[in-house]
Amino acid sequence: MNLGQVFTNEYVANYMTSLFSIPKKSPILDPCFGEGVFIKSLIDNGFSNITGIEIDYNLFQCANKNFKNLILLNRDFLMSPCKSKYDGIIMNPPYIRHEEINELKTYGITKEKLLNNKLFKDLTPKSNLYMYFIIKAISLLKINGELVVIFPSSWLNAKNGDCFKRIITKNCFIEEHINISGNVFNQKALVDVIILKIKKSKNKKPTLFKNFNFDGKEIYYRNQPPKIIIQFNKNFTEIASIKRGLTTGYNEMFINPPIKNKANLVPIVSSPKQIKGYSIKDSKYDYLFELQEFDLETKKYINAYENKIISMQKPKTLFDKIISNDKKWFFIKPTKYDGIVFSYFIRNDIKFILNESSMVIRDNFYVITPKINKYILFALLNNYYTYYQLECVGKKYGNGLLKIQSYDIKNLTFPMIESNSDMKKLEELAKSLIKTNNEDIIYEITDIISKYTNVSSTTICEGYFSIKKYRLEEKI
Ligand SMILES: C[S@@+](CC[C@H](N)C(=O)[O-])C[C@H]1O[C@@H](n2cnc3c(N)ncnc32)[C@H](O)[C@@H]1O
């Protein structure tokens, strides 16, 4: 059973303990102490009035032997009543996805029970278990009490993130928000984490943000990651060309028109949100008005818009066409959209998507037409060497947003793949990425490309993830 047993490194625990500004005699709680790293750190730092809770009997027994004179309890923190209030609470709560919470039934914890509890009424059913821990911990803080907690930063980007922040800050404020990279846990845990120092007080102050790196022994301020120089000898323009997707010039008229005749409606992919994975095939779409059958309904529709454009004298391009007596002012020029599609505003991951069904694509995307085998091009685009180059050149728009211009794509460089067997492998991997959306394949593609450069695949992956993390954290 998953009890979320990922244990904090002692150096990180010491750093977290050092964030308390409460007197040493204050009552402090660790509501899920695991192997007791925070308890040890609190004792080492002069705190003595410590209470610990742990649900796992074996861990509890171990700690009970090691730490005398403390109140250590073997029970569930979430559902058990707690009468005492604390000046300090320190914790690394269990990270358990909402789908797995019911597996804790033997401990008396189910999602239904949690959600029926008044304390958690503001949480959504999709909340991770750590969110319940944080809310309960806040409820047990005295006025001016402090909660120091380490937990995944993914909630910052999650849909329910704003709601969770509102709950946290209802009676408290976030005094310190610390982004910490490096291996902060004793096990390898693939999560990005933050440390928050939350204070229960009506007297709210602005949050202090810090970016730190942990190298296994020391915590230090983090600057922008150093640049990696990649030298490939093929330019983008040798292997592909690029253009913007379709611009209607008047979306109100051309996108999702209220027209019944399906012959005049063509599916069009408008937004990255409509696309799942690496293929356009199963995406959602809007409809584009593209005249095929000139029936009465369509005639009326066009006439109504003609009058509107004339009276508003805009959009200018259409107005000019109408007054110059262009009878085909409402026709949209057909273009080819097959190839590879790329959304130039990046929020999270960079992704090049195959448009094998030649769907019409809107101008929120670039359409890349291959000059070489489309699957090889797809692999050359979807790997960490290319993603890294784009992260470096893209323009930051704040809030974690990155904008890639078409000249950024044109300036990309690629290796010259010489071996036939590598070509074959890249083609197979591309097809498999399109079919399965399994992002591990991107590592495999990166590995093959690494044969053509001095920059190893590990270096480029680390470089890419740290520069991306740096961008996303700037949103704070
Ligand atoms: C992420 S670990 C952290 C342990 C320790 N605080 C540390 O940082 O090394 C979470 C701990 O919470 C315990 N746990 C899980 N569910 C619990 C619950 N409902 N009540 C109390 N402890 C719980 C787990 O057994 C685990 O030891």
Image (tube, rainbow, N blue to C red):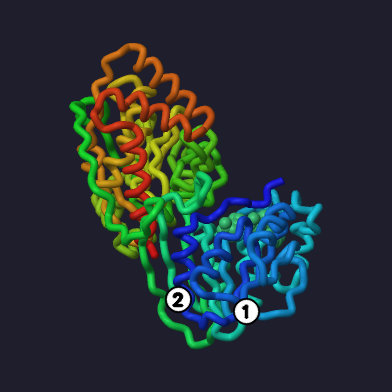
What is the C-alpha distance between the residues marked 2 and 1?
Answer: 18 Å
Rendered view: 445 above or below 262: above
Tell me: 91 left or right of 376: right
The quadrant holding residue 75 is: bottom right
Rendered view: 66 above or below 264: below
Q: Amino acid at mark 1?
A: Tyr
Q: Return the residue at label 1.
A: 86
Work out whether residue 198 or residue 432 is closer to the camera in this orientation and state it: 198
Residue plotted at (51% across, 33% down): 438
Residue plotted at (34% across, 55% down): 471
Residue 109 drawn at (x, y percent): 77, 58
Residue plotted at (53% across, 51% down): 258
Residue 318 drawn at (x, y percent): 30, 52
Work out whether residue 338 or residue 319 is closer to the camera in this orientation and state it: 338
Contact flag, marks 2 and 1 (Cβ < 8 Å): no
Q: Residues within 10 Å of mark 2 (few under 14, many from 20)?
A: many
Rendered view: 31 above or below 260: below
Give the mark, 2 or 1, whose residue is nearer the N terminus. Answer: 1
Residue 175's mark?
Answer: 2
Tell me: 275 left or right of 376: right
Residue 292 drawn at (x, y percent): 45, 36
Work out whether residue 116 or residue 396 is closer to the camera in this orientation and state it: 116
Q: Amino acid at mark 2?
A: Glu
Q: Does the rendering let one see residue 418? A: yes
- Could you tell me which secondary element the residue under label 1 belongs to? strand
Tell me: 207 left or right of 371: right
Residue plotted at (21% across, 29% down): 232
